[in-house]
Image (tube, rainbow, N blue to C red):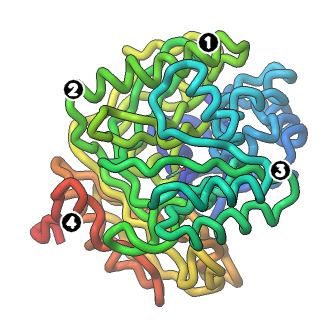
Amino acid sequence: MRVLVVGGGGREHALVDACGRAGHEVLCTPGNPGIAQQARVVASAQDAASLADLAVREGVDVVIVGPEAYLAAGLVDACRERGVPAFGPTRAAARLEGDKAWSKAFMQRHGIPTAAHRSFADLGEALTYARVQPLPLVVKDAGLRAGKGVTIARTHAEAEAALRDIFAQEGAQAVLEEFMTGQEVTILALTDGERYALTPPSQDHKTIFEGDTGPMTGGMGVICPFPLTATDLERIRAEIIEPALAGMRAEGHPFTGVLYAGLMLTPAGPRVVEFNARFGDPEAEAVLPLLSSDLAQHALDAALGHLDPATVHFRDGASAVVVLAAPGYPGEAQKGIPLRLPPLGSGEVIYHAGTAEQEGQLVASGGRVLAVTATAPTLNAALGRAYALADRVDFPGAQLRRDLGARIGARPDPRQV
Ligand code: GLY
């Protein structure tokens, strides 16, 4: 099969890697230097019509869309109009991620458990409400902010600052939510709109500093699998995934692609923190190395409306992703730092997230720069290998979290070093 992966970060590198492993010819746009070692990187304007035209010109069998911005821009719709199967939700269905106020209202309409909330289109009203809410208070930008539009405000002053930041943008909306406690877990459902297959549960680490402190990032590292109980898994299927897919069908926007359920395992059971409309990043870098079946075939089957969940398989074992971020991230990230990558052993892979080539030298070009991934029979072994590999990367000033897995009591096994 000829597959076009759209995007240029760590998630897309993992998508390219998974399709390549299954023996497909892989094209990618805009790609990155790591992707260029495994796929044909194709130059193209990045608007939906140009990308869909590219897919037609290149005769691709299926398009796999990575980042949410392309979904919100209608790339899947544009591909469908041209008769090219595309794996991802339409623009209307991608609203589940792109408009958090709409998404919360959708959950309410369909009885999907989530944090109590109120949405605001007016700064003054939001401030008045926020000032009398218990702390901590979750303040969310209703629009797309690359995973960084969320503040857990520990003081009313912090809540006010976050709201002022959101409303500094024209037409902004904010969602104010109750703070939920518990373990956070990500479940991804590959779906054709009706049938679905779940990936192993994983856990991202969203703040920049250890101990879950500091500002939110796009994600600083992932462990997989997260040890979910059979009861919680069954509740997630019955109370969250299935009502969400049924709700989207009932509202006339069947959801095809990857339904990302970001969940909190609260004392009252699993609740939705947020839905996203695509593979998580860096969750994809943890989950896809464990996939033993054919991602491109699943993408094509889902896009054509006949995904067979029984064909989706994951290997036993575990994976860990250590994100290496540039100094300054999640604020102004320092660019142009030279990178030198070590040789890789089996079960090790370094996905490029924010890299570029300058005069033949690999350099950091984004906030999250590398997703250092290892798989192993156990989670502790995977963590040990991922940290050992991260320590062999020459990236002056890199930021990383050394406490991945600590929330569930996992410990990097030093014997893997
Ligand atoms: N890792 C969080 C996200 O992909 O939104």
Q: Amino acid at mark 1?
A: Gly
Q: Secondary structure at mark 2?
A: helix
* Residue 43 figure quarter: bottom right
Q: How many other residues sit within 10 Å of disc 3, few (<14), some (14-19) or many (≥20)?
A: some
Q: Residue at x 69, y 60 (%)?
A: 127
Q: State the residue position of label 2.
A: 230
Q: State the residue position of label 4.
A: 384
| Residues marked 1 and 2 touching at CB (< 8 Å) | no
Between the C-alphas of marks 4 and 2, the distance is: 27 Å
Picture disc at residue 305? 1
Which of the two discs, 1 and 4, labels the residue nearer the N terminus? 1
Residue 123's place in the image compared with 240, above or below, is below
Q: Is residue 227 visible?
A: yes
Residue 362's place in the image compared with 241, above or below, is below
Q: Secondary structure at mark 1?
A: loop
Between the C-alphas of marks 2 and 3, the distance is: 42 Å
Picture disc at residue 33? none
Q: Amino acid at mark 3?
A: Gln
Q: How many other residues sit within 10 Å of disc 2, few (<14), some (14-19) or many (≥20)?
A: few
Q: Secondary structure at mark 3?
A: loop
Between the C-alphas of marks 1 and 4, the distance is: 41 Å
Q: Residue at x 63, y 18 (%)?
A: 248
Q: Amino acid at mark 2?
A: Ala
Which of the two discs, 4 and 2, labels the residue nearer the N terminus? 2
Q: Amino acid at mark 4?
A: Gly
